[in-house]
Image: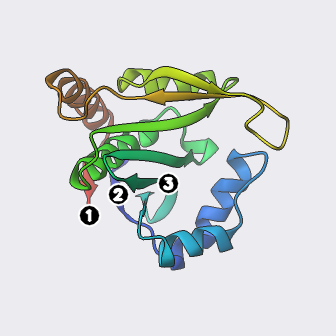
Amino acid sequence: MSSLLIRPLTVEDLGEVATIEKLSFPSPWPSSAYATELTTNRLARYIGAWSSGDLVGFGGLWLMVDEAHITTMAVHPTQRRRGVGSALLLELLQESRRGGARVATLDVRVSNLAAQRMYASFGFAEVGRRIRYYDDNGEDALVMTTPELESSEQLAREAAVRLHVHNRSDGGLQTHA
């Protein structure tokens, strides 16, 4: 993986976001939904990862009281398994802490085993199930939650992932949140 730049998404990035959405999800969010998230939802934070000037992945969350809910994450199919998703998730968890979140949660398709494995490596554990959650096929979603974000266990886990991502990156990881 070449050097990654992670920074907040802007409305100008939504064309590239739409491309990754369509390649990643059976029922992609429309760009108008992202535009609303970026311009009017005060709870929302969205970031993107760029490599060689191209958007290669993005993620978002909502900060609600003491919980961060990761709303979406996607990596361009040609860039998967290169540490992009891990780099994005590291930054989303940092943003969660900056926003005062105690824990982070997310929903993931029961069939998305690769994503579940990645989330588990960050300490996310299954805490529930949303029956027939996804409209496109009625698939269930697993609800996963981290331990306390400031716990020594969680911080150590993220430090290990960060080292692994850094070692896989030719030019390092830059964040501009």
N-term-proximal mark, 1 vs 2: 2
Q: Residue 143, percent across and down?
A: 55, 29
Residue 79, relative to residue 9: is it above or below?
Answer: above
Residue 121, relative to residue 6: is it above or below?
Answer: above
Mark 3 secondary-structure assignment: strand
- Left or right? Give the position of 78 relative to 39: right
N-term-proximal mark, 1 vs 3: 3
The residue at 28%/63% (across/down) is 177
Q: Residue 170, percent across and down?
A: 30, 43
- Left or right? Give the position of 54 relative to 20: left
User: For the residue marked with disc 2, what is the amino acid?
Assistant: Ile
Gap between marks 1 and 2 measured at Cα: 6 Å
Check disc 2: other Cα within 10 Å, few if <14, some if 14-19, many if 20+.
Answer: many
User: For the residue marked with disc 3, what is the amino acid?
Assistant: Phe
- Left or right? Give the position of 157 relative to 41: left
Give the labeled residue for mark 2: 6
User: For the residue marked with disc 1, what is the amino acid?
Assistant: His
Give the labeled residue for mark 1: 176
The residue at 70%/23% (across/down) is 111
Q: Residue 124, percent across and down?
A: 41, 25
Check disc 1: other Cα within 10 Å, few if <14, some if 14-19, many if 20+.
Answer: few
Give the labeled residue for mark 3: 58
Between 60 and 174, the residue placed more toward the observer is: 60
The residue at 23%/51% (across/down) is 100
Mark 2 secondary-structure assignment: strand
Q: Residue 126, percent across and down?
A: 50, 20
N-term-proximal mark, 3 vs 2: 2
* CB atoms of marks 1 and 3 within 8 Å: no
> Which mark identifies residue 39?
none
- Left or right? Give the position of 107 relative to 96: right
Q: Quadrant of the N terminus?
A: top left
